[in-house]
């Protein structure tokens, strides 16, 4: 099969976790490890095993139900040891006792702490009605603090209690000064104890470890969130502080000597669109929101409501321009398309310009002023629809100019299949291979 990078082309929640689970459990060839390459504990990748066990994977790879499949948290991930311990505890209750034994963590990865989480919630609360829709897990604050402070705590610091204490003390003092009326946070000593226990329990590795993983067997790179939430190309300010495209995974491949073009690029889409929390959502449909609840996604205290709408080819083509072409698509929730006759495909936007808009502009990375202006235009846009057939794979493939390699009609690996030639697309490697 070779290596595969799995990225959500929408706003997240398209089913990356269940696709990774299938690749590990039933894919064309065995998978040795799952590498997480962005985001942190805010990820929520729902996987249902063949026997009905359900787990929401956050930091551990979504292939963990498959015995022997390892997880590696790369330097691009944000590691929350407390959340990781809770996640491993839930897996133990489900009969997966060795998840932490199969885990390696890059020492350069940033640490997310209770101080980051408290700062995140205080800042989001202060925004009032202008909330961005944060998960409340401290992801943005972890990144922002690291950009302003060279001594931001990293995983490697957990191996040196004195250095860890200095970094956490500075972070705690920053939080107290920045948010004097913020929520109470644990003492530094308690965090030091918990994080050094984390270092004793898991294997912390250096940058050369990924090279070994890639040489040992097939690796799946599992992305978090979606391209339309990307820190530079998402619809600012309703974005994440994370690069959600293929870029981080391809950087890791290059650094490990495999080359950026050595992995298949697999883009995941639902047969309908979803978005969690505020921000532009041109194809949002209140009827679909009411009639298509997601059993594993609902209204969150910090994220806001789970919103549902029609498939949006304009937004997805924008995602493809941002990421560059993908080798193949994984289309999920095919069962929903087969059961309904009212699903549509948005092919253009009205209300943004005098003529219908079929392509959104792609601005240089970092131009948040331009991204903010695009957001304001999108908030005025109205969708132009055509019907979506009950068997939509060919329609989706044609709309996005990309073949479909995998379809999914349910949460289990047994609910998935490959259309004619789909398995060979996954085996074939990337466009530049």
Image: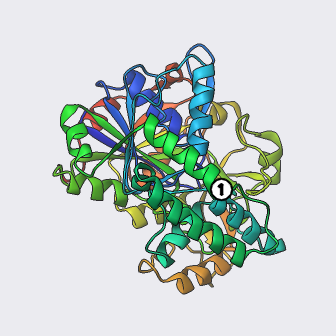
Q: Which residue is mark 1?
A: 114
| Residue nearest the observer in this picture, 71 or 358 | 71
Residue 390 lies left or right of residue 308; in this view the side is left
**Residue furthest front in the image:** 162
Q: Position of residue 328 (x, y in %)?
A: 36, 44
Determine which quarter of the picture holds residue 373. Answer: bottom right
The local secondary structure at tag 1 comes to helix
Seen at 43% across and 74% down, the residue is: 150
Q: Is residue 53 above or below residue 308?
A: above
| Residue nearest the observer in this picture, 268 or 349 | 268
Seen at 27% across and 32% down, the residue is: 424
Q: Is residue 383 above or below residue 414?
A: below
> Do we see residue 179 in this rendering?
yes
Q: Is residue 274 above or below residue 59?
A: below
Q: Position of residue 159 (x, y in %)?
A: 40, 49
Q: Position of residue 168 (x, y in %)?
A: 56, 62
Determine which quarter of the picture holds residue 340. Answer: top right
Residue 20 lies left or right of residue 236; in this view the side is left
Q: Position of residue 282 (x, y in %)?
A: 68, 65
| Residue nearest the observer in this picture, 258 or 402 | 258
> Do we see residue 240 in this rendering?
no
Residue 213 lies left or right of residue 223; in this view the side is left
């Amino acid at each position: 099969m070779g290596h595969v990078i799995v990225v959500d082309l929408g706003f997240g929640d398209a089913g990356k976790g269940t696709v990774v689970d299938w690749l590990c459990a039933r894919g064309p060839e065995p998978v040795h490890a799952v590498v997480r390459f962005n985001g942190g504990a805010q990820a929520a990748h729902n996987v249902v095993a063949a026997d009905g066990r359900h787990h929401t994977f956050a930091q551990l790879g979504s292939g963990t139900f498959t015995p022997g499949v390892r997880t590696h948290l790369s330097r691009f991930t944000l590691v929350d040891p407390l959340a990781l311990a809770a996640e491993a505890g839930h897996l133990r209750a489900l009969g997966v006792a060795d998840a932490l034994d199969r885990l390696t963590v890059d020492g350069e990865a940033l640490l997310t702490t209770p101080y980051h989480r408290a700062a995140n919630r205080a800042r989001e609360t202060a925004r009032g009605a202008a909330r961005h829709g944060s998960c409340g897990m401290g992801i943005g604050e972890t990144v922002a603090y690291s950009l302003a402070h060279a001594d931001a705590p990293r995983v490697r610091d957990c191996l040196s209690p004195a250095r860890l204490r200095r970094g956490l003390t500075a972070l705690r003092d920053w939080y107290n000064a920045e948010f004097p009326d913020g929520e109470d946070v644990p003492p530094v000593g308690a965090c030091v104890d918990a994080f050094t226990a984390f270092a004793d329990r898991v294997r912390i590795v250096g940058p050369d470890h990924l090279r070994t993983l890639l040489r040992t067997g097939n690796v799946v790179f599992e992305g978090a969130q979606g391209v339309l939430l990307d820190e530079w190309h998402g619809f600012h300010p309703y974005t994440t502080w994370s690069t959600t495209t293929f870029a981080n995974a391809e950087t890791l491949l290059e650094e490990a000597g495999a080359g950026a073009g050595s992995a298949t690029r697999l883009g995941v889409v639902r047969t309908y669109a979803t978005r969690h929390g505020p921000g532009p959502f041109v194809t949002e449909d209140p009827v679909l929101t009411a009639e298509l609840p997601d059993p594993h996604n609902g209204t969150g205290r910090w994220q806001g409501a789970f919103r549902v709408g029609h498939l949006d080819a304009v937004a997805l083509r924008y995602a493809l321009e941002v990421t560059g072409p993908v080798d193949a698509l994984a289309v999920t929730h095919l069962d929903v398309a087969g059961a309904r006759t009212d699903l549509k495909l948005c092919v253009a936007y009205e209300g943004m310009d005098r003529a219908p808009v079929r392509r959104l502009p792609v601005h240089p990375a970092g131009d948040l002023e331009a991204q903010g202006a695009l957001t304001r235009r999108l908030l005025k846009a109205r969708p132009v629809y055509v019907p979506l057939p009950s068997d939509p794979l060919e329609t989706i493939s044609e709309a996005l100019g990309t073949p479909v390699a995998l379809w999914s009609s349910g949460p289990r690996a047994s609910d998935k299949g490959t259309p004619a030639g789909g398995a060979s697309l996954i085996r074939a490697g990337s466009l530049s291979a």
